[in-house]
Amino acid sequence: MAQKGKKRVAVIQCNGGNRAERVIENDKIVGDCNERMEQYPEGILSCKWGCLGGGTCVDACKFDAISINEYGVAEVDREKCIGCGLCAKVCPKNLIRITTPEFTIYPACMNQDKGAETRKECQVGCIACGICVKNCPADAMKIEDNHAVIDERKCIACGMCAVKCPRGIILDADGIFTVRA
């Protein structure tokens, strides 16, 4: 939940959606994220780690701060979001985390598959290449479970990780350093 007096904001840690290979065609998919997981336990995308796009988080948000974007992925309106954490609680994939607005740089992939498998599954999935780690002057980046992770306590928001990421999975909420793949 949001801490009193300090602004918080939700971050979606997936950028794939329709850019991941489909297992089930869009026109056959119905229901919210929980219903999709129940109806298709094997998944609707070849990336089993990504956003289901069913809008469970959208329905949970009392401030109209989350929508499903053109890629079928949840997206946060940082101006409307108060960081209450309701969306994070209902996300069955645990792809939403709550942070403070000054942390604008974040990895938008939680895929834990090895790089070669990820390349086959999603156009914008993290392949754990380590380029972000090598280019971070603050030693804030690391690869954990085959995807990029940022230590917000060390991050100086220089954007080098985002600019250098060959897959465009490290995003800048301000849009300054984001390289869209």
Image (tube, helix red, strand yellow):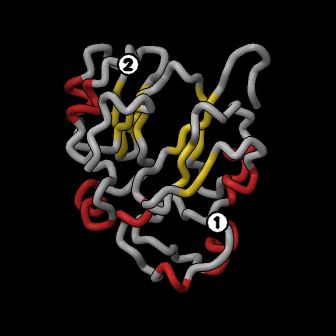
Classify mark 1: residues with Cα within 10 Å, few (<14), some (14-19) or many (20+). Answer: many
Secondary structure category for the residue under label 1? helix
Image-based side of 93 in relation to 64, left or right: left
Image-based side of 89 in relation to 100, left or right: right
Closest to the observer, 31 or 81: 81
Q: Which residue is mark 2?
A: 157
Q: Amino acid at mark 1?
A: Cys
Which residue lies at the image location 44% right of the left edge and 71% below the top edge? 45
Secondary structure category for the residue under label 2? loop
Q: Is residue 87 above or below residue 22?
A: above
Classify mark 2: residues with Cα within 10 Å, few (<14), some (14-19) or many (20+). Answer: some
* Residue 19 x/y as whole percent: 35, 63
Q: Amino acid at mark 2?
A: Ala
Which residue lies at the image location 46% right of the left edge and 50% below the top edge? 14
Which residue lies at the image location 79% right of the left edge and 17% below the top edge? 4
Image-based side of 1 in relation to 41, left or right: right
Could you tell me which quadrant the N terminus lies in?
top right
